[in-house]
Image (cartoon, rainbow, N blue to C red):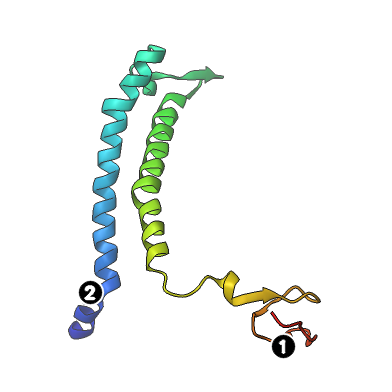
Amino acid sequence: MLKEFRQFLLRGNVVDLAVAVVIGAAFGALVTSMVEDLITPIIAAIIGKPDFSDLTFTINDSVFRYGSFLNALIAFLTIATAVFFFVVVPVNELMRRMRSEPPIDEATRQCPECLSEVPREAHRCAFCTSELQPA
């Protein structure tokens, strides 16, 4: 049982997941610091309020702390933007360059009868069995 547990821990996806969680936590702390120490003071210089967490309103003795929500929203949008531009865009570009197969559009065509995708060289549609004109 100990051997199986060791094999489970040493599988690539478990180690990758652990590294991703640690890096994600560190990245989140970095972006949170950037929001609190840079972006919020810039907004405060424009608007005049240095910290949004003090913003509240009260209805029937219930306090709504919308300022904390604004801080969290700014942090979320900043993290999402950073992840998009520093992770998603480069990975998509790398995957586009690494793709070795031809694009699907060049290898297939549409059947005029049933609108299914069929291989370009096909003489008969595999879905509706209609005869196709040569490509």
Q: Quadrant of residue 115?
A: bottom right
Up-down relation of residue 25 to residue 63 (above or below):
below
Percent across and percent down for residue 72 are 40, 34
| N-term-proximal mark, 2 vs 1 | 2
Q: Quadrant of residue 10?
A: bottom left
Residue at 76 percent across and 83 percent down: it is 132
- Residue marked by disc 1: 123
Q: Amino acid at mark 2?
A: Leu
Q: Which residue is most to the top?
A: 48
Mark 2 and mark 1: Cα distance apart in space: 52 Å
Up-down relation of residue 118 to residue 63 (above or below):
below
Mark 2 or 1: in front is 1
In the image, 62: left or right of 100? right
Up-down relation of residue 38 to residue 98 (above or below):
above
Residue 9: numbered disc: 2
Q: Is residue 55 visible in the rendered structure shown here?
A: yes
Up-down relation of residue 56 to residue 96 (above or below):
above
